Amino acid sequence: MTTSEITAARFERHRLSLAESFTISRGTTEEATVLTVELEDEAGRVGIGAAGPSAYYGETAESVEETLPALLDVATEVGDPHAQQVIEERLAETAPAEAAARAAVSIAVHDLAATQAGEPLYRRWGLDSDRPPQSSYTVPIDSPEEMRDRARRTVERGFETLKVKLGTDADRERLDAVREGAPEARIRVDANCAWTAEEAVEHTSWLADHGVEFLEQPVPADDIDGLRRVSVEGELPVAADESCVTAADVGTVADAVDIVVVKLMKCGGLRPAKRQILAAKAAGLDVMLGCMIESSASIAGACQLAPLVEYADLDGSLLLADDCYDGIVQPDGRVDLMATDSGTGVR
């Protein structure tokens, strides 16, 4: 293994159009702004990462842009990309509230270290390339007719699992349409905090009738009692996303849900994500590895953790019309880690 110090650091802001509009219960997105990070060593090798900030978690492209120079200074001052414990601690001290910004640097550091070692990141962690679950593909809120057509087009592309966004006054009609368009697909539903616990319990009956696998974040993030009620009284397993941001939140939701959703952009990077996954496992919970609408520059990093989890929702870069980087190939949702020569596989 040939190692050398980080000698240069840079970032760039990109506005990326989505292939189609993307609506959830909180609003509609037509384009995503991501900030890509590159760390270069003395030999000219480059580690790549990216931030996909979410206003829901208090981050914007502007806040990430303001924060990244200080975080990149941390990486260059530490110098050694293999000193990841030290780098993570200093990133957290420098920008405790900017998880997506920290994640961008974290991914780039890990990509560079694994590239220097000449092996894929998942191998450095001793993970099995055959273990990643198939990723779901999201059907956002739209008219029932359009949701039916999107579901049909998605399964025709080879995706076997759909994640359906709900949280409207016509949810049942919309799910009916999705099931009509994809009668054999595995379906998961995400309400993004839109329902009350009473509504969610009631909805689980007809969701179960449609063969829905599990229900993600049916109630507001701070309503842990509501999550617990839906789990106990409802007919489906329940996943916590907005209610479980970091490893520190696992204990809060452990007796209220069945599944925890881990995202690099909300927990702050690869080491924090791995820590959250292991905390969930220790609590007897399953894990879904998720994402925001992101570039392949960050999705590739998340894919390296996929062998550790039961479920994956890593379609963020697939929703883009154009991307600024290439990453892990997943044409039908299957994460092909074997195609990674070194690093995270981002190019």
Image: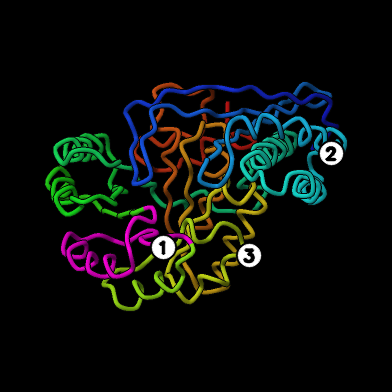
Q: CA distance from mark 2 to mark 1?
A: 38 Å
Residue located at (33% from left, 42% from top): 138
* Residue 281 image offset from top left, x and y in percent: 54, 68
Who is closer to the viewer here, 66 or 280?
66
Residue in the image at 56% along x and 67% along y: 250
Q: Residues within 10 Å of mark 2 (few under 14, many from 20)?
A: many
The residue carrying mark 1 is 239
The mark lying in front, picked from 2 and 1, is 1
Q: Earlier in the sequence, mark 1 or mark 3?
A: 1
Residue 319 vs 277, above or below: the answer is: above
Residue type for callout 1:
Ala
- Name the kind of residue labelled 2 in the image: Asp
Q: Tell me where the magenta segment starts and ends, as one range.
A: 192-221
Q: Secondary structure at mark 1?
A: strand
The residue at which mark 3 appears reads as 248
Q: Position of residue 225 (x, y in %)?
A: 43, 74
Residue at horizontal 32%, vertical 28%?
20
- The residue where tag 2 is placed is 80
Q: CA distance from mark 3 to mark 2?
A: 28 Å
Kind of residue at disc 3: Ala
Label 3: which secondary element: helix
Q: Quadrant of residue 182?
A: top left
Residue located at (37% from left, 58% from top): 216
Q: Nearer the viewer, residue 82 or 261?
A: 261
As drawn, the label of residue 7 is none
Q: Earlier in the sequence, mark 2 or mark 1?
A: 2
Horizontal side of 91 relative to 345 (left or right) equals: right
